[in-house]
Image (cartoon, rainbow, N blue to C red):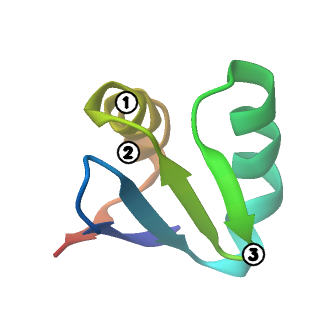
Amino acid sequence: MTFQIEDRGNGVKWVQIDRTDMYDIARWCQETGCGKQVNFKQISFRNESELTMFLMRWQTTNENINTR
């Protein structure tokens, strides 16, 4: 699994995700209310706390995290 984190200002973080992993991640976001699927390969987060929860859940299966 690979994804990139991008800060677009105003505290909103965007994560670009490989399409093959999006189904499980989108389902997790819906179940937890953490993050919102923006399109078929991006998730946005309202704040650092949501992003941290995402990283705690998915970083264990991901060694390719790139931040910008």
Which residue has dot 2 on it? 59
Q: For residue 56, which numbered disc appears in the image?
A: 1
Q: Is residue 61 left or right of residue 10?
A: right
Q: Using a 10 Å C-alpha cutoff, classify the residue at mark 1 as few (fewer than 14 neighbours), some (14 to 19) or many (20 or more).
A: few
- Residue 15: percent from left, percent from top: 45, 64
Please tell me how crowded label 3 is: few (under 14), some (14-19), or many (20+) other residues with Cα within 10 Å.
few
Instruction: Tell me the amino acid under the disc marked 2.
Output: Gln
Give the CA distance from mark 1 to mark 3: 20 Å
Is disc 1 in contact with disc 3, using a CB cutoff of under 8 Å? no
* Residue drawn 26% across the image and 46% down it: 11
Residue 9 is situated, as x and y percent measured from the top left of the image, at 23, 61
Residue at the image position 61 percent from the left and 78 percent from the top: 18
Name the mark on residue 20. Answer: 3
Q: Estimate the spatial distance between the alpha carbons at disc 2 and disc 3, rounded to whole Å.
A: 16 Å
| Residue shown at the point (79%, 24%) measured from the top left | 31
Q: Residue furthest left?
A: 68
- Cα separation between marks 1 and 2: 6 Å
